[in-house]
Amino acid sequence: MHLPFSVAAPVRTARLMLRPFVPEDLEPLLGIHSDPRAVRYVPYPPRDRAAVDHVLTRKIGDTELAADGDLLELAVVRSDSDELIGDVLLILTSTEHETVEIGYIFATAQAGHGYATETVRALLDLAFGPLGARRMIARVDERNTRSCALLERIGMRLEARLIENEWFKGELTSEVDYAVLAREWPDRPRPFPRGAAFPGDATSSAPNSA
């Protein structure tokens, strides 16, 4: 892996831009993190302004991957409107094993347009390209069928189902784990063109930090 790693310039896709967070992102980020539907499958309850302000300060500083546990957090912005619609991150889970984990949460109002799919593909291109990761993983609440469908659609492999592995927001839940290797990614299936709309596009996937 090429460490330390940071995003020198915004990552651009057909319709989106992924960039570091800035203080002006407070209001749109609050709109996402305070929505009970958006945070249904992430490991925190709806957040108030004070909580989001605290989290945003951390996100602004999470710009480099250098050691295990480091986070790279990026705001997802629509290119046509400059509207912040998502919050994504890469976690450096193991430098030894060259493994990173992906997490994301999107505004529920933006679901169904393929933005999450477009973003996750861009993050995989980033991880397997300039970062030089060998393996990408994603951990999802099994009930989050839209997120599972997204990961399978882009070519990630279901590798494990952890039955009733943890208490999550007062419920005993199961986790499904997905992965893909760098050597598999160039040959990933692309049944839909970049920017296509998917009625079941996900709003969240939830690692333990977000």
Image: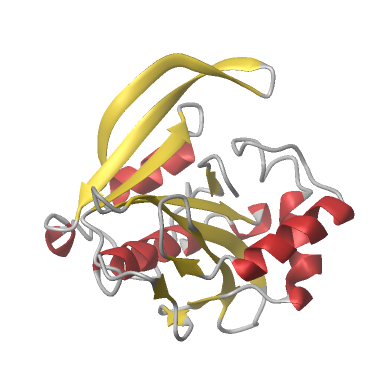
User: What colour scheme governs how the chains and residues are painted in the rendered image of this protein?
Assistant: secondary structure
Left or right, 191 with respect to 30, comes to: left
Choose between 176 and 38: the one closer to the eye. Answer: 176
Check the image and report above or below for 33 versus 2: above
Left or right, 154 with respect to 197, comes to: left
Choose top left, top right, bottom left or bottom right for residue 30: bottom right
Residue at point 38% right, 71% down? 4
Choose between 74 and 193: the one closer to the eye. Answer: 74
Horizontal and vertical percent for residue 167? 60, 17
Horizontal and vertical percent for residue 20? 58, 75
For the question of whether residue 193 can be seen, the reply is no
Horizontal and vertical percent for residue 162? 38, 19
For the question of whether residue 186 can be seen, the reply is yes
Horizontal and vertical percent for residue 166? 53, 18
Residue at point 53% right, 55% down? 112
What is the total number of numbered labels drawn onto the structure image?
A: 0
Choose top left, top right, bottom left or bottom right for residue 186: bottom left
Q: Quadrant of the N terminus?
A: bottom left
Check the image and report above or below for 173 versus 92: above
Choose between 205 and 20: the one closer to the eye. Answer: 20
Choose between 190 and 20: the one closer to the eye. Answer: 20
Left or right, 24 with respect to 133, comes to: right
Residue at point 25% right, 31% down? 159
